[in-house]
Amino acid sequence: MRWFRLLPLLLLIIPAVACKESPPVPQELVGNWVTQDAKYQGKTLVIDPEGYIVLIVDEDTMPKAEHIDHMTSTEVAGVTTYVLDASDQAGTHDRITVMYRAVNGGELRLAHPSQVVWQRAAGPAT
């Protein structure tokens, strides 16, 4: 019978624990990224400061958005490697490895599927 007195407290704690907050996204990653690689022409990679990574394919395709749940980073010889554990709205988990170099205004390389170079797009970040 005592646990009934704890029920209101549990109802307050459970949602707070369930709501995961994104780790802060480093400012160097925030922005719109494009590539000259023919395979990805017309596609934009967006990393926003709220903890989302979005792949925009084109105007007719629904963007693929993933929430960054956890992030680690290491730096070696001017290259910072970020490992992003992310999940989409359906709860599917993904691990994305991004290598950042500050050259040429910033370059990203995604580890998979290839070493395509993404550069910061001109204009404001969305």
Image: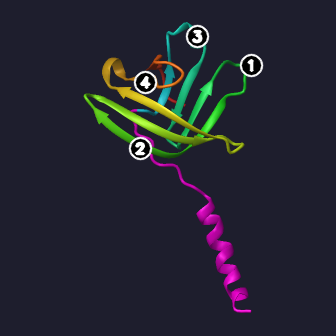
Give the Cα separation between the discs numbered 1 and 2.
34 Å
| Residue with the mark numbered 2 | 72
Residue sitting nearer the eye, 42 or 101: 101
Neighbourhood count class around disc 3 (C-alpha, 10 Å): few under 14, some 14–19, many 20 upward: few
Q: What kind of colouring is applied to the model shown?
A: rainbow
How many numbered marks are there? 4
Q: Residue at x 46, y 33 (%)?
A: 30
Q: Which residue is drawn at 45% across and 38% down?
A: 83
Residue 107: x, y in percent?
Answer: 39, 22
Q: Which of marks 4 and 3 is nearer the N terminus?
A: 3
Give the Cα separation between the discs numbered 4 and 3.
16 Å
CB atoms at circles 1 and 3 under 8 Å apart?
no
Q: Earlier in the sequence, mark 4 or mark 2?
A: 2
Residue 56 higher or lower than 21, as above or below? above
Q: In which quarter of the image is the N terminus?
A: bottom right
- Identified by mark 4, the residue type is Leu
Residue 51 higher or lower than 32, as above or below? below
Q: Which of marks 1 and 4 is nearer the N terminus?
A: 1
Q: Which of marks 1 and 3 is nearer the N terminus?
A: 3
| Residue with the mark numbered 3 | 39
Residue 66: x, y in percent?
Answer: 61, 38
| Residue with the mark numbered 4 | 108
- Identified by mark 1, the residue type is Asp
- Residue found at the far bottom of this picture: 1
- Identified by mark 2, the residue type is Thr
Q: What stretch is highlighted in magenta?
A: 1-28
